[in-house]
Image: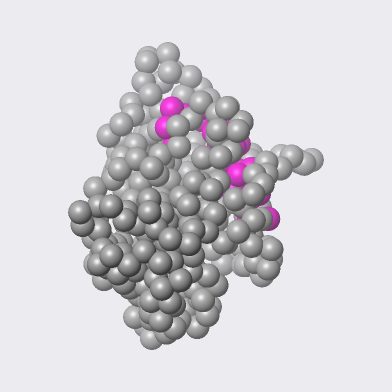
Amino acid sequence: MRTLTTLDDLRLELDAARLSGRSIGLVPTMGALHEGHLSLVDRSVAENGVTVVTIFVNPTQFRPGEDLEAYPRQLQDDIALASERGADIVFAPPVHEIYPDGYSTTVSVVGITETLCGAPERRGHEHFDGVTTVVAKLFNMVQADRAYFGQKDAQQVAVIRRMATDLNFRTKVIACPTVREADGLALSSRNAYLTAEERPRALALSKALRSVAGALSDGQRDVATLSAIARDELSVTDSVEYFEIVDPDTLEPVSTIERPVLAVTAARVGKTRLIDNFLLEPHATAVTTPTNPNPTPQAAHLQG
């Protein structure tokens, strides 16, 4: 495996791979790799001739009040983990390689970036502008056949898909199921911020989704009733930013469930902001609940 820091070196490596007929998979991350990230590497290695893992703490996607300098950085550990899982290239550029002096271009997706995590009161649109800008640059730099993202960041996946379609990127966006710890908590780099007292309360997010999935399986279709069930579970958190049931593509709210929809939630436990989601399938013979820590992958702040 090679670790590269410049675009010129990256292009030399990938040009050679293309000439030999190998497909290229991309796993964009901000580092601090955990099993969620590594499951994406596994998927890419299985489906492509070359896998590129990018490690770049993207300053443009941090919202006001978020501490960019406090974001966990462990590059050497990340390189070792990526290598162990079969990645061929780790691209870990400095900031000036991504944003050169005088950089003044932003990629912005309207509509689906202005709800949920992007609601005006959360100033999340600025965050998504940072995400779409850096992902657009990485798509252009790598020219991958496929790029892999975690379904835990469902709104991010929807936004990146929209951007890739609108801008005619060749890269196919593939979402892989959320990887969870044994107790159901979605894996995230931010879980490290939870104290021992906070950690059990963080389970409220997955419990809320599990309760909603169970009620749906029992025949409940009314979104207001399902939302009340979820909010009761979420009451042990310090604050609930939202719980919504929405269309998976447009993120528009729905009032009743007659087709697959997405249950999404965000809440704070202590100082840590957590997100989670679950695809609800009303006509499935059995609704799968989010408890499996290592689900089989399937197609559907950059990944943390």
Q: Residue at x 34, y 40 (%)?
A: 299
Give above or below for 158 relative to 35: above
Task: Please state the horizontal and vertical placement of residue 301, each as a whole percent of the image.
Answer: 55, 56
Question: Which image quadrant is residue 257 in?
Answer: bottom left
Q: Quarter of the image holding residue 127?
A: bottom right
Task: Name the magenta segment's main secondary structure.
Answer: helix
Q: Nearer the viewer, residue 219 or 124?
A: 219
Residue 17 is situated, as x and y percent measured from the top left of the image, at 41, 20
**Scheme by which the image is coloured:** one colour
Q: Is residue 272 visible?
A: no
The answer to whether any part of residue 284 appears in the image is yes
Identify the magenta region: 126-147
Q: Is residue 243 above or below residue 287?
A: below
**Is residue 37 one of those drawn in magenta?**
no
Residue at 46 percent across and 24 percent down: it is 14
Tell me where residue 262 appears, x and y as whole percent: 42, 56
- Give the left or right position of residue 252, taking residue 234 as reference: right
Q: Nearer the viewer, residue 211 or 171?
A: 211
**Residue 201 occupies which quadrant of the picture?**
bottom left
Q: How far across and down, in percent of the image, does residue 58 sit?
A: 59, 51
Q: Residue furthest top?
A: 19
How many marks the image carries: the answer is: 0
